[in-house]
Image (cartoon, rainbow, N blue to C red):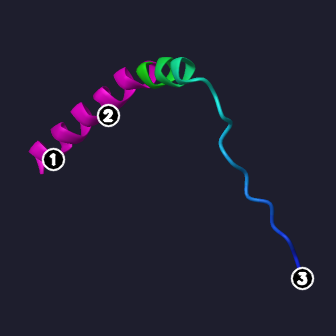
Amino acid sequence: MTTIAIPHPQIVPQDQRLNERMNLFPHEKELAKQSDQVNAEQ
């Protein structure tokens, strides 16, 4: 029998998680804007 280890996300403090999440927000907003533009062109 083969055992496969499944990696789990690192557990971090909530303030660190929130800070990193807020750093991603501008990128997500830009992707949404580009997606809206493509949909409008279709």
Q: Residues within 10 Å of mark 1 (few under 14, many from 20)?
A: few
Q: Residue at x 19, y 43 (%)?
A: 38
* Label 2 residue SS: helix
Give the mark nearer the N terminus: 3 vs 1.
3
23 left or right of 2 in image:
left
Q: Residue furthest bottom?
A: 1
Q: Which residue is mark 1?
A: 39
Q: Position of residue 27 (x, y in %)?
A: 38, 26
* Among numbered discs 2 and 3, the one appearing first in the sequence: 3
Region rendered in magenta: 23-42
Which of discs 3 and 1 lies nearer the camera? The answer is: 3
39 relative to 24 in the view: left or right: left
Quick one: SS at disc 1?
helix
Label number found at residue 12: none
Query: x and y percent of residue 21 in the render?
Result: 45, 25
- The residue where tag 2 is placed is 31
Amino acid under disc 1: Asn
Q: Label 3: which residue?
A: 1
The answer to whether mark 1 and mark 2 are in CB contact below 8 A is no
Quadrant in which the N terminus is drawn: bottom right
Q: Residue 35: say if magenta.
A: yes
Disc 3 on helix, strand or loop?
A: loop
Q: Is 25 placed left or right of 40 in the picture?
A: right
What residue sits 47% from the left and 22% below the top? Answer: 18
Q: Is residue 30 rendered magenta in the image?
A: yes
Q: Nearer the viewer, residue 23 or 5?
A: 5
Mark 2 to mark 3 CA distance (whole Å) = 44 Å
User: Which amino acid does the dot numbered 3 rest on?
Assistant: Met
Q: CA distance from mark 1 to mark 2?
A: 12 Å
Task: Identify the residue at image location x=24%, y=41%.
Answer: 35
